[in-house]
């Protein structure tokens, strides 16, 4: 609804009483110098003096009377109800048009800023599937941070959302959530349920399932500008371990990474902020 604007009622005020014209002293001074003739009075030439004086007084009283009447009317209107004309009661169609425009502008601006936030700052993602259990479960709502990647490189153990194509299910790209294990140029080796980076055992400071090997001992060399990712539920996750297999997701290009999982806000009882390792 647009902001309703009401006009304040203007309270009529009593108009000022007309000022009594000032009498010029020059006329009186000139009359003193001229001898009186017949019935002429000083200061009034060719006029009966009493009549002129009475007329002057009457005019003065009339002015004061008129001012008093006008003042009473002004006070009556101020204390009473001012009648509203019929045409003033009718709604102005321009007001509805203005309210509609205000709402339309508000919606357009909100949509614009929401798009800017989604494209450059953050997005909300919903987890679908068990591959990141016990860290995330199906229907968890997450806030994905896009700003950090503008100023910082991807770290090992970052939980990232990226787009990829699962050829087993569809030819269309969709979003996945996994944890970064191998960085560009590193050699990732999986043997006996454990992960090695460049020949050194990787200590993983988070809860996760043991890492099975799909093809015995596996070794992967991460290409430049790509990342090796796995789900925390290592027994039920399709990830970079299937590199070279048509059904796998393979290495993840940097350009396909949308952001880092920062906050789980639903369900409320499992609210959590995820710090970078």
Image: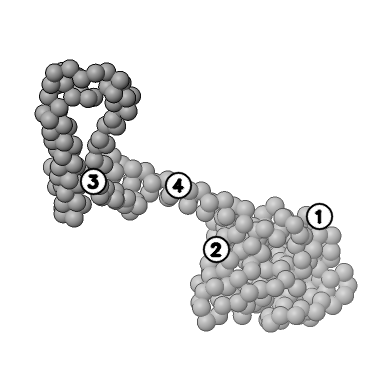
The alpha-carbon separation of the residues under discs 3 and 1 comes to 88 Å
Circle 1/circle 2 CB separation < 8 Å:
no
Q: Residues within 10 Å of mark 2 (few under 14, many from 20)?
A: some
Q: Residues within 10 Å of mark 3 (few under 14, many from 20)?
A: some
Circle 1/circle 4 CB separation < 8 Å:
no
Question: Is residue 84 left or right of 159 when viewed as pictured?
Answer: left
Task: Give the mark nearest the N terminus, 1 or 2.
Answer: 2
Picture quadrant of residue 155: bottom right
Q: Position of residue 110 (x, y in %)?
A: 47, 52
Secondary structure at badge 2 equals strand
Q: Position of residue 145 (x, y in %)?
A: 64, 62
Observer-nearest residue: 204 or 236? 204
Task: Give the mark nearest the N terminus, 3 or 1.
Answer: 3
The alpha-carbon separation of the residues under discs 1 and 4 comes to 42 Å
The alpha-carbon separation of the residues under discs 2 and 3 comes to 65 Å
Picture quadrant of residue 153: bottom right
- The residue indicated by pointer 1 is 224
**Vertical placement of 185 versus 42: above or below?**
below
- The residue indicated by pointer 2 is 124
Picture quadrant of residue 256: bottom right
Q: Residue drawn at (19%, 51%), measured in percent from left and top?
A: 75
Q: Residues within 10 Å of mark 1 (few under 14, many from 20)?
A: few
Q: Which disc is residue 108 wearing?
A: 4
Residue mark closest to the camera, 1 vs 4:
4
Residue mark closest to the camera, 4 vs 3:
3
Placement of the C terminus among the 4 image quadrants: bottom right
- The residue indicated by pointer 3 is 14
**Vertical placement of 63 versus 242: above or below?**
above
**Vertical placement of 69 versus 263: above or below?**
above
Secondary structure at badge 1 equals loop
Q: Residues within 10 Å of mark 4 (few under 14, many from 20)?
A: few
Residue mark closest to the camera, 1 vs 2:
2
């Amino acid at each position: 609804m647009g902001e309703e604007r009401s006009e304040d009622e203007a309270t009529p005020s009593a108009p000022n009483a007309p000022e009594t014209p000032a009498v010029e002293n020059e006329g009186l001074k000139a009359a003193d110098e001229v001898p009186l003739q017949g019935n002429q009075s000083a200061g009034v030439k060719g006029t009966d003096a009493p009549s002129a004086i009475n007329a002057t007084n009457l005019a003065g009283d009339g002015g004061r009377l008129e001012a008093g009447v006008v003042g009473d009317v002004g006070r009556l209107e101020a204390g009473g109800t001012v009648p509203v004309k019929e045409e003033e009661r009718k709604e102005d169609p321009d007001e509805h048009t203005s309210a509609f425009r205000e709402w339309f502008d508000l919606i357009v601006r909100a949509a614009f800023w929401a798009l800017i936030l989604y494209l450059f700052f953050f997005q909300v993602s919903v987890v679908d599937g068990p591959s990141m259990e016990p860290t995330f479960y199906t229907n968890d709502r997450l806030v994905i941070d896009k700003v950090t990647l503008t100023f910082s490189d991807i770290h090992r153990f970052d939980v990232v959302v990226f787009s990829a194509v699962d050829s087993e299910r569809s030819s269309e790209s969709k979003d996945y959530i996994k944890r970064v294990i191998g960085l560009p140029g590193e050699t990732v080796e999986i043997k006996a349920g454990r992960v090695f980076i460049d020949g050194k055992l990787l200590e993983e400071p988070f809860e996760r399932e043991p890492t099975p090997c799909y093809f015995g001992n596996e070794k992967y060399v991460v290409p430049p500008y790509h990342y090796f990712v796995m789900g925390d539920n290592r027994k039920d996750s399709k990830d970079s371990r299937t590199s070279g297999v048509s059904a796998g997701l393979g290495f993840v290009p940097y350009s396909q990474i949308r952001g880092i999982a920062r906050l789980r806000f639903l369900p409320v009882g499992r609210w959590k902020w995820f710090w970078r390792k």
